């Protein structure tokens, strides 16, 4: 894990600056990220426990993670709806529904993120340990390098490439034993 985290750190720290290593992060952002990581970790472990209790005679085994994801999404929609209602009312939601381009992008990100991405992460947890699945999922900063280059024309430096290689080497160490 430390090798993988070191590789991700090499790739991410100081990106876009002239310094060798820089870390200028707002405290609120760091706290939210730590909270998100804790909640995602707890959610992944609880999902593994929940996946073990599905009746495989009632639903094909490959559908179980997507079924579990459905219930996670229902909880998320409920929580988001309550926050939206009590914070700003439903007017911003109604306005957003009329933005065709925004809705098409939101639909695509919903399909790839919460539906396919979380569904596959639950499949990973179903078939391996939560720690290994979580570490592989944590390779996102490395995996987004090429799409960031193609879509946003971000430079890929030698430091980023070395960080990616170290990260992949760290993940491969899980499978040596």
Image (cartoon, rainbow, N blue to C red):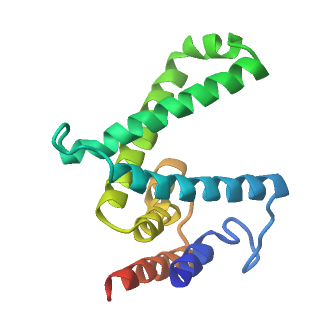
Tell me the residue at 36%/43% (across/down): 116
Q: Is residue 31 above or below residue 14?
A: above
Placement of the C terminus among the 4 image quadrants: bottom left
Tell me the residue at 52%/84% (across/down): 3
Mark yes or no: residue 158 visible. Answer: no
| Closest to the observer, 55 or 102 | 55
| Closest to the observer, 34 or 48 | 48
Q: Position of residue 93 (x, y in %)?
A: 63, 16
Tell me the residue at 56%/11% (across/down): 98
Q: Position of residue 88 (x, y in %)?
A: 77, 18
Q: Is residue 103 above or below residue 121?
A: above
Instruction: Tell me: 175 left or right of 138.
Output: left
Q: Of all residues shown, which one is farthest toward the right?
A: 27
Q: Position of residue 8 (x, y in %)?
A: 56, 73
Tell me the residue at 15%/42% (across/down): 57
Q: Quadrant of residue 64?
A: top left
Q: Is residue 120 above or below residue 104?
A: below
Mark yes or no: residue 92 visible. Answer: yes
Q: Position of residue 145 (x, y in %)?
A: 49, 62
Q: Of all residues shown, which one is farthest toward the bottom?
A: 177
Q: Give the number of marks.
A: 0
| Closest to the observer, 15 or 78 | 78
| Closest to the observer, 95 or 79 | 79
Instruction: Tell me: 108 left or right of 53.
Output: right
Q: Is residue 9 above or below residue 111?
A: below
């Amino acid at each position: 894990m430390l090798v993988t985290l070191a590789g991700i750190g090499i790739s991410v720290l100081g990106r876009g600056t002239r310094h060798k290593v820089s870390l200028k992060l707002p405290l609120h952002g760091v706290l939210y990220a730590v909270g998100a990581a804790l909640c995602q970790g707890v959610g992944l472990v609880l999902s593994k426990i929940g996946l073990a209790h599905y009746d495989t005679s009632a639903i094909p085994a490959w559908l179980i993670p997507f079924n579990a994801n459905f219930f996670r999404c229902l909880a998320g929609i409920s929580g988001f709806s309550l926050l939206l209602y009590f914070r700003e009312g439903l007017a911003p939601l109604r306005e957003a529904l009329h933005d065709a381009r925004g809705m098409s992008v939101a639909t695509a990100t919903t399909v790839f993120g919460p539906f396919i991405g979380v569904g596959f992460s639950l499949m990973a947890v179903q078939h391996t340990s939560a720690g290994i699945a979580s570490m592989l999922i944590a390779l996102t900063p490395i995996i987004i390098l090429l799409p960031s280059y193609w879509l946003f024309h971000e430079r890929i430096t030698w430091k980023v490439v070395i960080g990616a290689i170290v990260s992949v080497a760290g993940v491969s160490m899980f499978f040596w034993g």
